[in-house]
Image (cartoon, rainbow, N blue to C red):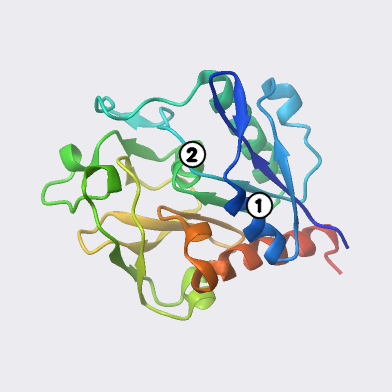
Amino acid sequence: MAIRIAIPASFEDDRNTLDHRYARSVQRAGGIPWVIPVQPPRAASKVACDGLLIPGGPAVTLGLVGSLPDDLQPDHPEHAASTLALLQACVAAGKPVLGICYGMQLMNAAAGGTLCGDIAEAIPKALPHSHNRGAADHTIHVRSGSQLHRLVGKTVCEVNTRHVQGILSVGDDYAVAATAPDGVPEAIENSSGSCIGVQFHPERMGAVMQPLFANLIAYARRAVNPN
């Protein structure tokens, strides 16, 4: 059974692009990556996929509390609208979603959660979380019993870090599944475990985080063939 995973392409300078590591991670998990260009929201909401992977990107302004720092650019309005419409359609249809960095933030905001523009400004004593600001890899504490815990098999993992924004409040039907040592949310998931968002980049971490992509494909197969 062919499982098609929609992956919204990035959009900059009138060009749609995608880091090949996202597509390869989907392929390794047994899915077919289907790269979706920016399009009007109505068209995006009708994309006939089996699951959705939202990759990293610029800043999310939906649900933003305060302003963005000077070194962080907001998402292009057309890309933001297209990706949000695709996300909302997949969630409404009960299709699984994996959100990475920008993707996690958009998932949270679309569910009514809030975001800060700059962790360093909004959260006292926060660690550096952006490699562009000198941040190094750090550990995360995975909540015992969470879907993320079942997938990675650990309560402490080391992850990369490439984000300036962070979650302030968690959206409806999501719970925090992992935090950084400073308490900043590093993963969220819904109650069924079919929708997971991570602040780090599993597509750059090899086999240790490949179960996240396998989880996406597994839930997509169940949605296609519930019996």
Viewer-proximal residue among 70 and 68? 70
Viewer-proximal residue among 125 and 88? 125
Q: Residue at x 44, y 56 (%)?
A: 188
Q: Residue at x 36, y 57 (%)?
A: 186
Task: List the single residue furthest toward the bottom.
Answer: 153
Q: Residues within 10 Å of mark 2 (few under 14, many from 20)?
A: many
Q: Which mark is residue 106?
A: 2
Q: Amino acid at mark 1?
A: Ala
Vertical placement of residue 134 versus 77, above or below: below
Task: Count every numbered label the image shows and give the total.
Answer: 2
Task: Locate residue 84, reporting x and y percent.
Answer: 58, 32
Q: Which mark is residue 43?
A: none
Image quadrant where one finds the C terminus: bottom right
User: Circle 1 sits in a helix, a strand or a loop, which is it?
Assistant: helix
Task: Locate residue 97, reporting x and y percent.
Answer: 62, 51
Task: Locate residue 92, reporting x and y percent.
Answer: 68, 42
Distance from Cα at disc 1 to Cα at disc 2: 20 Å
To which quarter of the image does residue 61 belong?
top left
- Residue 138 vs residue 50: left or right? left
Can you identify the residue that label 1 sits on? 23
Dot placed on the residue nearer the N-terminal end, 1 or 2: 1
Q: Residue at x 20, y 59 (%)?
A: 182
Task: Locate residue 174, reporting x and y percent.
Answer: 47, 53
Select label 1 or label 2 by which is in front: 1
Q: Amino acid at mark 2?
A: Leu
- Residue 9 vs residue 141: left or right? right
Vertical placement of residue 20 versus 88, above or below: below
- Residue 124 vs residue 22: left or right? left
Q: Residues within 10 Å of mark 1 (few under 14, many from 20)?
A: many
Image quadrant where one finds the N terminus: bottom right
